[in-house]
Amino acid sequence: MHDNPVESLSLGKGSDLTIVLVHGRTQSPQDMRVHAERLALDNVTFLFPLATGNTWYPGLFMAPIADNEPALSAAIGHYEAIVSDLIAKGTPAHRIVVGGFSQGACLTSEFLARHPRRYAAAILWTGGLIGPAGTVWPLRPVLSGMPAYITTAENDPWVPTDRVRETYDWLRQSGARPELDIFEDREHGVLDVEIAAARRMVETVRPEAADERFVQPG
């Protein structure tokens, strides 16, 4: 089960947005806190979920789904509990950014497919939808208009470019507005350019998120 506490960090005096950042395999909330501080966004609340044993599911993200159960479903359920709690306490989905790195980005991609809402945006640093080759994910029109930023590298040992492009296409076909960066050669991490691109995306959605007249599609 993934019932660990969720760490938080508030930057600035108010909170226009809440950003959920999910750590990668063998990482911790502290790794995501570092990226949050690199984003240097004011008036944002960050939440950092923690996986049991610092890993959300045991196998590779393109393994058969059954190989990652029951941990995968438990992780998705934990993610949904965090978001549902935010909504129940008064933060609408259009003021929530979901995201993560590596295994956390894969989990976020799958969360978008299984629990779609019109979130403010999605940050998918080196990740993609979960499942073996040939998996077909239902399109989610409720994501229409949602910005997303998704990345990997040609030489990444864990997240192949084909699956990231597949995820990009799924987002686009669902009506989202994804931006894709595939780097030729970089370590398995988050470059400054990826931080800057995510920051720009968040700043562009901030006015819409603050508009209480916003009506979610679907």
Image (tube, grey):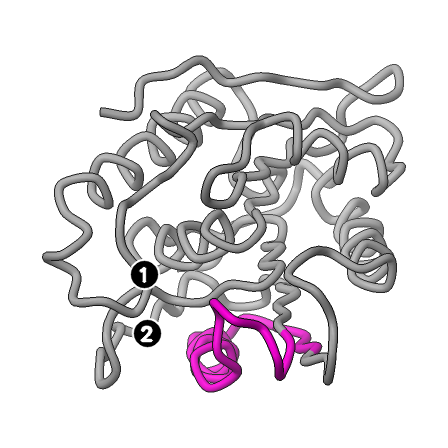
In the rendered image, which quarter contains the N terminus? top left
Where is 154 relative to 120, above or below? below
Front residue of 97 and 212: 97
Would you say the residues marked 2 and 1 are in contact, meaning their CB atoms lie under 8 Å apart? no
Where is 17 relative to 193, above or below? above
* CA distance separating discs 2 and 1: 23 Å
Q: In the picture, residue 29 is in which quadrant?
A: top right
Give the image location of residue 19, x and y in percent.
64, 36
- Asked if residue 119 lies in the magenta stretch, the reply is no
Give the image location of residue 48, x and y in percent.
57, 27
In the rendered image, which quarter contains the C terminus? bottom left
Kind of element beneath mark 1: loop
Region rendered in magenta: 153-181
Where is 170 relative to 218, above or below? below
Give the image location of residue 216, x and y in percent.
50, 51
Give the image location of residue 154, x and y in percent.
62, 83
Q: In the picture, residue 59 is in which quadrant?
A: bottom left
- Disc 1 marks a residue whose amino acid type is Leu
Label number found at residue 139: 2
- Disc 2 marks a residue whose amino acid type is Leu
Instruction: Identify the residue under disc 1.
Output: 60
Q: In the picture, residue 190 is in which quadrant?
A: bottom right
Image point 43% across, 57% down: which residue? 106
Mark 2 against mark 1, which lies toward the viewer?
1
Crowdedness of circle 1 by 10 Å Cα count: few (<14), some, many (20+)? some
Q: Is residue 168 left or right of residue 3?
A: right
